[in-house]
Amino acid sequence: MGTTMARTKTEKNLSDVDLGGMKLFCGNAHHDLGHRVAEYLEIDLGRCTSTKFSDGEIRVMVDESARGNDVFILQPTCYPANDTLVELLIFLDAFRRASAKRLTVVIPYLGYARQDKKTKPREPITARLIADLISVAGAQRVVTVDLHAEQIQGFFNIPVDHLYAGPIIGRHMILEGYREENIVVVSPDVAGVGRARSLAEMLGGVPIAIIAKRRPEPNKVDIIEIIGDVEGKKCVMIDDMIDTGGSVITGAEVLLKRGATEVVASCTHAVFSGNASQRMQDSVISKVIVTDTVPIPSVKMFPKLTILPCAPLLGEAIRRIHLDESVSELFDDWR
């Protein structure tokens, strides 16, 4: 397919670290990521089964004892979002009734996070509802990566470890030679300025630009203005997710019209709904750099795509939580 799967070498030797009493289980949403995190931690993935009754109801069985263990359940609530979310809730109930000592849910991608506030009358704040459901089901801690809106952490009444995939993308770009004077990091909206600034600092203090836009309706975008100088520059767009690809493609076209020489798109969550993969392959974007927080089937891969592994980040966060060590130290280079 021509797709590049970028890998990072695990430098930390965990063989001398006692992870006794910890167990990692994985739902059906992303088995590959679960296995890679277990490999990083040098432990076996816990045995569990999730099937469906004839009417579509989810049936979960935990196939080994969890009593008194520090249990981590890895499950991005990605497509199909309703199934993966309900499966996670049922897993939580099963482990709570199995007398686990502590239940931590590792949700690399938190679905429904885009509905984090009311913008029109009689709209739900679905992100708060999801947080309540996870807490009530029995979760005692949440680990997630690049929430769509950071204030969602406050929707939970339990501790939330909010991880950032920006350093993974930044280190890859440095290795690829993006630390140059003609680089501009572009935020695709005003809300993402902090993320763009952090990447710009990591790339050596390069300037940033901002795309001011409005959304007349979901998955529709109108570009209003480009704030910042992009003429003669290679632009690196960074966002938390790419869904239909409309925002990033439209933004790239406007950047090139303003004199940019190249546009590279990057994000944490490669949602890639509908024909997004083909649209990005056919677009003016030169490269698309993502992480594997959600599964990317082969039919959604394309030659311009580079996938960076997030298993070392998740594995190290899990290890630190289990050993009561600092998680924030992982982001000392991401201010």
Image (cartoon, rainbow, N blue to C red):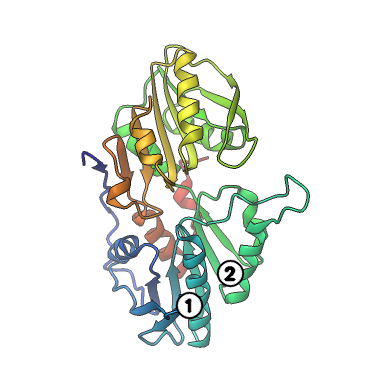
Query: Which residue: 44% across, 33% down?
Result: 202
The kind of residue on which mark 1 rests is Glu
Against 240, is 202 above or below?
above
Quadrant of the rendered structure where residue 265 is? top left
Q: Which mark is residue 222?
A: none
Q: Residue furthest left?
A: 2
The kind of residue on which mark 2 rests is Ile
User: In screen coordinates, is 296 left or right of 324?
Assistant: left
* Residue highlighted by disc 2: 134
| Residue 319 in picture, x, y percent from top left | 40, 65
Q: Quadrant of the N terminus?
A: top left
Q: Which mark is residue 57?
A: 1
Quadrant of the rendered structure where residue 15 is? bottom left
Task: Select label 1 or label 2 by which is in front.
Answer: 1
Query: Which residue: 29% across, 71% down?
Result: 43
| Residue 56 in picture, x, y percent from top left | 45, 75
Marks 1 and 2 in Cβ contact (< 8 Å): no
Query: Which residue: 45% across, 30% down?
Result: 249
Query: Which residue: 47% across, 41% down?
Result: 244
